[in-house]
Image (cartoon, rainbow, N blue to C red):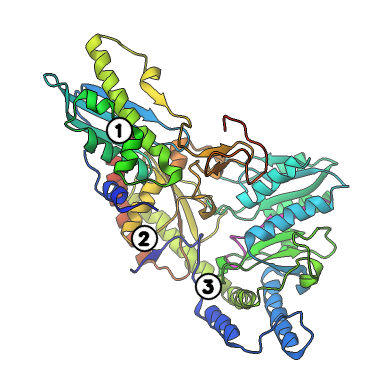
Amino acid sequence: MNVINLDHISFNPLLPEVREAMIDAINNKDLHNPSSQHKAGEKSAEMLAQARQNVADLINAADPKEVVFTSGGTESVNHAVKGAAMANREKGNHIIATNIEHNSVIRSLKRLSAQGFKVTSLSVDESGRVDPAAVADAITDQTILISVMHSNNETGTIQPIAEIGAIARENKVLFHCDAVDSVGVVPVDVQALNADLLSFASNPFYGPTGAGGLYIRRGTRIFPLLDGGVQEHNKRAGTENLIGIIGMGKAAQLAAAHMEERRAHLADLKKYLVEQLPQYVDEYIINTNPDHSLPNLLNISLKYIEGESVMLMLDEENLAVSTKSACATGSLRASHVLLSLGLSHSDAQGTLVIAWGIDNSKDDLQKLLSTLSGVVSTLRSMSPLYQK
Amino acid sequence: MYNQVVMDHFKNPRNVGVIEDPDGVGEVGNPLCGDMMTIYLKIDENEKRISDIKFQTFGCGSAIAVSSMLTEMAKGKTLDEARKISNKDVAEALEGLPKNKLHCSNLGADALHMAIQDYDDKKAGIVRPREEREEKHEHGDGETCYCPYCDVELDEKASFCEACQRDLTEEH
């Protein structure tokens, strides 16, 4: 089975160098618990420190100690949102977010709401972006946290994070940025963004799943999510996932070194796809912001047909795409993100998320387009909504 | 995700299309997941039997497979026999559907029954308003439950939501 992976937002393969680094670590009989005081432990701690430095360099953290390793994006977000809210409760109980955040943010906020926190969920405009002025207007003397995602995991649209970060800084409100789908794909600089907290994961930049991190600016008041030992500078208890972190560190080093060439390749593929699409399919909506978006993702709504049916038919032709967030595919409901953009229910159900990676080529997209053309015709021929 | 029978009916749907000048039409839509289904009937007047049946469906793989299987089951049956086809029968004929897709099977038989009702109404000279002819489906027996606080689908009838731990009312 030779599947063309155009579902990179759900999963990226490990780069050969990353796999090699992880296998070397697995085969290293001297690898030990990095918290141990003996020589093997110290050697392992050095490897951990190198990975932390690589990750810190990728996001331009001033001090590698500001990087806390986690089990991935979801844990990082939960730590940031819940940890910051609980630690700053005496200052206020108001949190600002947008209504297109990932479920790890939304559900963290729902849980905090049940505990007495007030949440303002800001709308985005038709292009999928939140107005920084709306963020400023929403701030009250009770506001303790602003959480806005860097790029949306379904549409790829990038938010005006630097402006929002500046507003948060000016108002002395903590700012968390969920940058899970951006870090390692496009430049993310915690200094330029004014982020106090920034969550990310290893897989989007071809590191292993199950490894991620949370940037915590020095001096930020935040409770740990896990209590126990003193690992991760007292911010995250539990013995580190050293093999995964070594892989993540290698992936971070490669992402930083090859950022521009990767981005150029991904953007070239996006341009090709957008230009070619009208020749193969009609009556569709592009839900990805044309000017502010990730270079590796395009979200389209194919009118009159349903996304899962398209996905299944493409899968039969060994083309892997997704319909919305992989985290939400068990849900039958239309994407909250697309409904927030103002799409009708049926258009939102007809969504396809095409996400390519550095291993994809124009030939892959050409195969997708020619196959998609037939799939759309077939499904529209049986749709009661299609009149032609 | 889907078994072979479902995938076969999804990939090779039977009886797709529109019957011109149909004797009965049934339209159902499910606002939960956006599925919509239309069933067209041609009736043999002498035998009161479904001589032809076609469908149009906007929906997921499960909804298309349900439509296809339903039309296969109903074709050639008398109206009395067709009225007895239940949503459960369709799901069983497909050898099962994923739990969160069971509601899709609820569209199929309901659309068929509405199409038969439409035929009966025409015969009796009854004209129903469009709103009555388009059935809107909400949760029913055997469907997934839902927590209104978390916007989360729950696997089974539950007294509380595992995500937020809140008690759930009867209507969830």
Question: Dot 2 lies on which element?
Answer: strand
Q: Where is residue A160 shown, x and y percent of the image?
A: 66, 52
The residue singled out by tag 2 in the image is A319
Name the residue tied to disc 1. Answer: A387
Specify the quadrant that holds the C terminus of chain B: top right
Q: Quadrant of residue B34?
A: top left
**Contact? badges 3 and 1 (CB < 8 Å):** no
Question: What secondary structure predominates along the stretch shown in magenta?
Answer: loop
| Range of magenta residues | A172-185
A85 or A352, which lies in front?
A85
Are labels 1 and 2 assigned to the same chain? yes
Query: Of marks 2 and 3, which one's residue comes earlier in the chain?
Result: 3
The disc labelled 1 sits on which kind of residue?
Gln
Q: Residue A146: x, y in percent? A: 74, 49
- Residue B113 at x, y percent in the picture: 30, 25
SS for callout 3: helix
Which residue occupies the foreground of this view, B64 or A37?
A37
Q: Quadrant of the rendered structure where residue A118 is?
A: top right
Name the amino acid, label 2. Answer: Leu
- Residue at point 63% right, 46% down? B162
Q: Is residue B126 above or below residue A120?
A: above
Q: What residue appears at the point 50 percent right and 80 percent down from the top-left corner?
A: A16
